[in-house]
Amino acid sequence: AEFMLKEMIGLKRLKRDLEEAKVMAMFSQKRREFSLEADSECRNHMLFLGNPGTGKTTVANLIGKIYQGMGLLSKGHTIVTDRSKLMGEYIGQTEKNITEAIKQARGGVLFIDEAYNLVSCKDDRKDYGKEVINALLPVLSEPNPDMIVIFAGYEEKMKEMMKVNPGLKDRFPLCFHFDDYSASELMEIARQSLAAMNFHLTTAADSRLLGIMKKAVSIKDEYFGNGRWVRNLIEHGILKSMATRVMSAPAGTVFDERLLCTIEECDIMQAEKCFLTDLSVKISISRPIGFRV
């Protein structure tokens, strides 16, 4: 798991901060073994702050294994959930859902993605989201819970969420930031993804795709999908363009490995028209409407 984390593209700040947290956890563990710690608490609950597609869920799955290897978790598995899975149609059902999630996560990680949605819905008149928070507070306060709870989401929205309950922030001693990917990192993600599917780019296609990454980064907004956007670009843009080109080949064309694996510049150009246009439109719509003096 530690090797897989190191091999992940980008995330330099996260990797550094996580290494420091791991060292401190092992240090405290050694001191407890020698009865040198007056406080016997072993709580490692975390906040994952960052935009979509920056690897938060992937890292959460690795955290369980890493902390199990350190002897701080008994199982090391990860339960991934969100508001839609925790909310019930009535108060009792919500409590049952969160109790079951906690039970399943014991010994590992309970990862709640877009956690701010638990309390941010304006039409949440019955406070079902706050019920989830209240149900989690006792677990978050346990001195040795044999579980790590991770709340993940946009940084600003997560900060607002922490204000809902005055004692909530203090129950998450570890906070990690997931930075957006640079154009070169997005390109590396694309190359790795394509290689894993037995596709390769011509020199011209590679250059054109790098240009798309640079343009995307230059016009992105706070909701840019990062790695998720790259995967969509590949699966729903580039490969569809390539498939259309290949399957439209003249009768008598010999289908071979090169034809079925080589992505040409024209495939990139066709995908570019759609994906960069869509991204530009989203940026334009998100801007305030009106005049500025």
Image (tube, grey):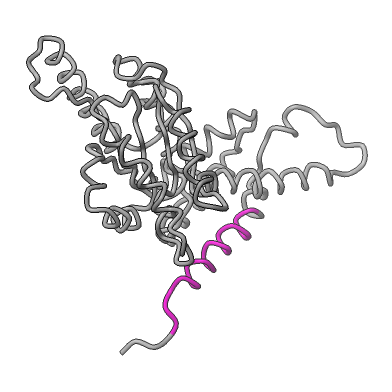
Q: Locate the N terminus by quadrant.
A: top left
Does residue 115 appear left or right of residue 30 in this picture? Answer: right
> Viewer-proximal residue, 174 or 19?
174
- Residue at x 43% of width, y 49% of height: 114
Magenta stretch in the rendered image: 271-289
- Residue at x 46% of width, y 64% of height: 125
Principal secondary structure, stretch drawn in magenta: helix
> Viewer-proximal residue, 137 or 158?
137
| Residue 287 covered by magenta stretch | yes
Q: Quadrant of residue 181?
A: top left
| Residue at the outermost top position | 34
- Residue at x 36% of width, y 38% of height: 150
What is the x, y in percent for residue 266?
67, 50
Q: Is residue 95 above or below residue 120?
A: above
What is the x, y in percent for residue 263?
66, 40
> Viewer-proximal residue, 80 or 228?
80
